């Protein structure tokens, strides 16, 4: 007979199993959750509301809502006219940056070859092996 138990503030239907074969005078009761379709969907994105306040739980509708939100925030508009002039900086100006051959060699030689490549697609093993040739460039 299915019952309901409370776990993590959700009511989960459970089934009770009685084992009477252990001792003739005692019974052991074990409860385990019954898997449901709603439980399988708990690890995804929660239902979302659109601009009209309607709630959607279908994956395609949620993807469309998120796509509209991201496209409204991340645009390629020219923002140069919208930047505010905050006046002079309160920080000291940054000094000159000095790049030395030894410093470049040290960074290239310290590359971890098992990490993924960067956006340039150059393997870390290649950069590490050619560090002495690339550093003076």
Image (cartoon, rainbow, N blue to C red):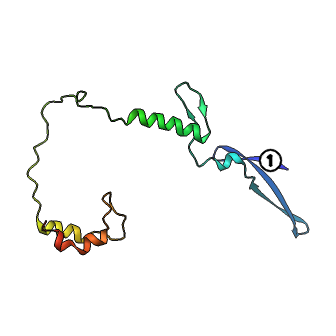
Examine the image and state in which quarter residue 27 appears: bottom right
Q: Which residue is mark 1?
A: 3
Task: Give the residue at x 25% y 72%.
Answer: 128
Task: Give the residue at x 60% y 34%.
Answer: 56
Left/right of residue 41 with respect to residue 81 in the rendered view? right
Q: Is residue 29 above or below residue 134?
A: above
Task: Give the residue at x 56% y 38%.
Answer: 62
User: Helix or strand or loop: what does disc 1 sit on?
Assistant: strand
Nearest the camera: 7 or 27? 7
Nearest the camera: 26 or 30? 30
Rendering coords of residue 112 (x, y %): 31, 70
Nearest the camera: 86 or 102? 102
Q: Residue lying farthest right?
A: 24
Rendering coords of residue 31 (x, y %): 77, 56
Exactly how many numbered labels are in the figure?
A: 1
Examine the image and state in which quarter residue 134 appears: bottom left
Label 1: few (<14), some (14–19) or many (≥20) C-alpha neighbours in 10 Å: few
Which image quadrant: the C terminus? Answer: bottom left
Examine the image and state in which quarter residue 73 appears: top left
Task: Give the residue at x 34% y 63%.
Answer: 117
Nearest the camera: 125 or 42? 125
Rendering coords of residue 100 (x, y %): 11, 64
Q: Is residue 72 above or below residue 28?
A: above
Q: Is residue 97 above or below residue 64?
A: below
Rendering coords of residue 94 (x, y %): 11, 47
């Amino acid at each position: 007979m299915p019952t309901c138990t409370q776990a993590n503030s959700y009511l989960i239907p459970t089934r009770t199993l009685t084992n009477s074969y252990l001792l003739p005078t005692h019974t052991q009761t074990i409860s385990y959750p019954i898997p449901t379709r709603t439980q399988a969907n708990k690890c995804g994105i929660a239902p979302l509301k659109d601009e009209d306040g309607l709630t959607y739980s279908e994956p395609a509708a949620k993807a469309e809502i998120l796509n509209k939100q991201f496209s409204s925030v991340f645009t390629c508009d020219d923002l140069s006219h919208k930047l505010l002039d905050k006046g002079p900086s309160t920080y000291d100006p940054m000094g000159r940056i000095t790049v030395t051959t030894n410093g470049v060699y040290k960074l290239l030689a310290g590359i971890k070859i098992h990490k993924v490549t960067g956006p340039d697609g150059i393997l870390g093993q290649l950069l590490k092996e050619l560090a002495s040739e690339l550093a003076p460039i």
